[in-house]
Amino acid sequence: MLNRRWFRVLALLLGLALVAAACGDDDDTTSSGGDDTTTTAADGDGDGDGADAAVSLDDRCEEAKANGVEAPDGFTVRLITDIGKVDDRTFNQFAYEGM
């Protein structure tokens, strides 16, 4: 009986630890909303002042293409949605547009 009680207490504490970890904040990157721009804490100009640098997804893609990065032959992207459609103005539409 005592072992079950300790097991339940341990399970509860583990669950609370997981919830607390999920609610944590990552200071390295933040999303700025819906403009395809990622703000990073990296210092982009090299002067050591720690200023935030904004980089768009299009800029990253163009940089990768310029460096010779290509998709492998036969590469396809597929999107699976829930019961909604891709024009429902929710995460389905945002995922489709991002794809």
Image (tube, rainbow, N blue to C red):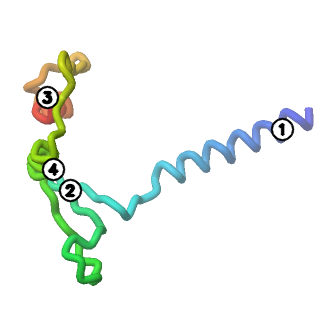
Q: Which residue is drawn at the image coordinates 48% and 48% (left, top)?
A: 22
Residues 64 and 29: in front is 64
Residues 76 and 11: in front is 76
Tell me the CA gap for discs 3 and 2.
Answer: 19 Å
Residue carrying label 3: 96
Q: On residue 5, which mark appears?
A: 1
The quarter of the picture where residue 61 lies is top left
Which of marks 1 and 4 precedes in the sequence?
Answer: 1
Q: Is residue 64 left or right of residue 17?
A: left
Tell me the CA gap for discs 4 and 1.
Answer: 53 Å
Which of marks 4 and 2 precedes in the sequence?
Answer: 2
Task: Give the quarter of the figure containing the N terminus.
Answer: top right
* Of marks 1 and 3, the one in the foreground: 3
Q: SS at mark 4?
A: helix
Q: On residue 38, which mark appears?
A: 2
Which of marks 3 and 1 precedes in the sequence?
Answer: 1
Query: Which amino acid type corresponds to the residue marked 2 in the rendered image?
Result: Thr
* Of marks 3 and 4, the one in the foreground: 4
Q: Is residue 43 above or below residue 97?
A: below
Query: Which amino acid type corresponds to the residue marked 1 in the rendered image?
Result: Arg
The quarter of the picture where residue 88 lies is top left
Residue 95, horizontal then vertical, whole percent: 18, 32
Would residue 34 be seen by someone viewing this image from the given angle?
A: no
